[in-house]
């Protein structure tokens, strides 16, 4: 078991412009602002959704699209370091006109209609992702003890 303890840092509220890529916009924002450790949440609507599902048996992502206008009911994610660069991991639940929900790991290709985002930064060394053999995923690695 490993845990990181942080002090709260700056909190950012942002609106993603209509037509922008949801994940791409957030990636550009965290890179431009040097954000390496954060938690994020968002809500709004998209014009189309691009999601992934991780197949635990095949140990690979299956990509799928939902080509319709959807509410973003609840999105959440985090920022940590992968290969020394800020990496966003985010999942979201979307709903159609009848309230049916879809969800998954958010991929590039979710086109924003309107989106309100909160990014809560943490002070201190960012969690680092490394390849995890049991899952085949890049997961948070236990921090090395300080010398
Ligand atoms: Zn995921």
Image: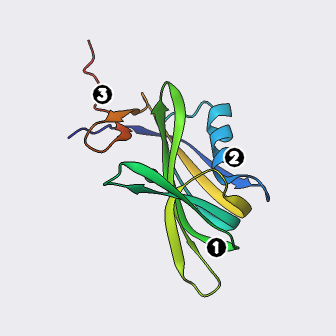
The residue wearing badge 2 is 25
Q: Residue 75: x, y in percent?
A: 54, 61
Count neighbours of disc 2 (C-alpha within 10 A) and say few if under 14, some if 14 to 19, many if 20 or more. Answer: some
The image shows residue 143, relative to residue 80, as above or below, that is above
Query: What residue sits 69% from the left and 52% below the top?
Result: 14
Query: What residue sits 35% from the left and 37% below the top?
Result: 140
Front-lying residue, 108 or 71: 108
Mark 2, secondary structure of its residue: helix
Mark 1, secondary structure of its residue: strand
Q: Residue 58: x, y in percent?
A: 35, 51
Spatial separation of the CA atoms under disc 1 and disc 2: 18 Å
Count neighbours of disc 1 (C-alpha within 10 A) and say few if under 14, some if 14 to 19, many if 20 or more. Answer: many
- Disc on res. 43: none
Mark 3, secondary structure of its residue: loop
Please tell me in which quadrant of the rendered image residue 130 appears: top left
The image shows residue 136, relative to residue 83, as above or below, that is below
The residue wearing badge 3 is 143
Task: Say which quadrant the C terminus sits in.
Answer: top left
Q: Is 66 left or right of 4, judged from the image as shown? A: right
Count neighbours of disc 3 (C-alpha within 10 A) and say few if under 14, some if 14 to 19, many if 20 or more. Answer: few
Q: Earlier in the sequence, mark 1 or mark 2?
A: 2
Spatial separation of the CA atoms under disc 3 and disc 1: 38 Å
- The answer to whether the beta carbon of the residue marked 1 is less than 8 Å from any atom of ligand 1 is no
Q: Residue furthest bottom?
A: 98
The image shows residue 22, relative to residue 73, as above or below, that is above
Q: Is 69 left or right of 2, judged from the image as shown? A: right
The image shows residue 96, relative to residue 19, as above or below, that is below
The residue wearing badge 1 is 71
Q: Earlier in the sequence, mark 2 or mark 3?
A: 2
Q: Earlier in the sequence, mark 3 or mark 1?
A: 1
Task: Say which quadrant the N terminus sits in.
Answer: top left
Front-lying residue, 36 or 91: 91
């Amino acid at each position: 078991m490993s845990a990181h303890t942080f002090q709260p840092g700056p909190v950012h509220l942002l609106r993603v412009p209509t037509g922008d890529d949801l994940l791409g916009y957030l990636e550009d924002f965290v890179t431009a602002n040097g954000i390496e450790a954060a938690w994020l949440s968002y809500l709004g609507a998209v014009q189309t959704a691009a999601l992934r599902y991780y197949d635990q048996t095949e140990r690979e992502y299956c990509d799928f699209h939902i080509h319709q206008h959807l509410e973003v009911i609840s999105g959440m994610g985090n920022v940590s370091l992968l290969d020394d660069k800020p990496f966003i991991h985010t999942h979201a639940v979307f709903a159609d006109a009848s309230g049916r929900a879809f969800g998954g790991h958010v991929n590039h290709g979710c086109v924003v209609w309107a989106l309100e985002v909160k990014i809560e930064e943490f002070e201190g060394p960012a969690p680092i992702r490394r390849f995890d053999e049991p899952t085949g995923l890049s997961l948070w690695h236990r921090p090395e003890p300080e010398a």
